[in-house]
Image (spheres, grey):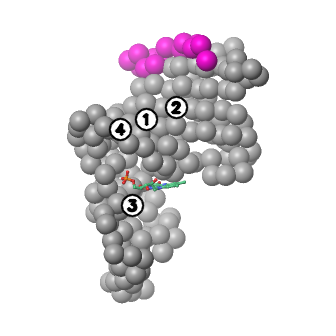
């Protein structure tokens, strides 16, 4: 029996993954492409999911953010091994509002907050000492006060246009269903495995 709403189905599977997965169920692969079409993929953590889409946080000066500046489309892939399920999401990417990012940033451990100030993500560094120096510099800068969100660090939301739900079945007779956005509705389609 096909589900009719991909957001509800994702929420149901994600809730199940949170109960069953021994590893972090929020981990997913994020694929982007540069202006020449060259793809790259890396893991991120899902920090928000609702009917607007799937949110992750990152350094806005990183290569992934640069890709998304020029080509604001991304794909996400979750694999929940214990559940034997995969979910793929494909959509347009937009920044989360500043207040949403501030609220999330405030929940992070202080050392993670300082790390966000210190890390020039994906740029070359001489060694760990350079990172530790930068963290110490940020700690000195903010003293005992609250650490504000750095301007170069925020959330990006993937607004799904396509969801695909995959369930492992014996002998590779897997179940796959794809949901494609059609205006305000979703078209469901079963796919050969
Ligand atoms: C399990 C896991 C979760 C990660 N989560 C994030 C994340 O939420 N945000 C992030 O910027 N990097 C995260 N990273 C690091 C990225 O995979 C990547 O190394 C980094 O963001 C630089 O990517 P880029 O050079 O393509 O921009 C994570 C890595 C792992 C292994």
Sequence-wise, the earlier of marks 4 and 1 is 4
Quarter holding the C terminus is top right
> Callout 4: 10 Å neighbours few (<14), some, many (20+)?
few
Residue position for label 2? 88
In the image, residue 138 lies at what x, y percent? 35, 80
In the image, residue 181 lies at what x, y percent? 43, 20
Residue position for label 1? 75
Residue in the foreground of this view, choosing between 36 and 56: 36
Residue position for label 4? 39
Residue 107, visible in the rendered structure: yes
In the image, residue 183 lies at what x, y percent? 38, 17
Picture residue at 50% right of the left edge, 66% below the top: 108
Residue position for label 3? 102
Sequence-wise, the earlier of marks 4 and 2 is 4
Of circles 3 and 2, which is in front?
Answer: 2
Residue 117, visible in the rendered structure: no
Magenta stretch encompasses residue 53: no
Where does the magenta region start and end? 180-193
Magenta stretch encompasses residue 181: yes
The quadrant where residue 153 appears:
bottom left
* Figure check: 167 above or below 120: above
Mark-to-mark CA distance, 3 and 2: 28 Å
> Callout 1: 10 Å neighbours few (<14), some, many (20+)?
many
């Amino acid at each position: 029996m096909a589900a009719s709403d991909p957001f509800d189905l994702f929420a149901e599977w994600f809730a199940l993954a949170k109960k069953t997965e021994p590893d972090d169920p929020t981990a997913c692969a994020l694929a982007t492409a540069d202006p020449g079409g060259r793809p790259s993929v890396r893991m991120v953590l899902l920090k928000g999911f609702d009917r607007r889409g799937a949110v992750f946080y990152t350094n806005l000066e990183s290569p992934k953010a640069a890709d998304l500046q020029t080509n604001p489309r991304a794909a996400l892939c979750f694999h929940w091994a214990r559940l034997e399920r995969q979910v793929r999401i494909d959509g347009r990417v937009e920044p989360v509002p500043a207040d949403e990012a501030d609220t999330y940033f405030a929940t992070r451990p202080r050392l993670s907050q300082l790390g966000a100030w210190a890390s020039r993500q994906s740029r070359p560094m001489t060694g760990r000492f350079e990172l530790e120096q930068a963290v110490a510099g940020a700690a000195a800068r903010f003293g005992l006060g609250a650490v504000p969100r750095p301007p170069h660090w925020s959330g990006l939301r993937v607004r799904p246009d396509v969801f695909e739900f995959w369930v492992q079945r014996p002998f590779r007779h897997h179940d796959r269903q794809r949901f494609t956005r059609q205006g305000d509705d979703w078209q469901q389609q079963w796919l050969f495995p």
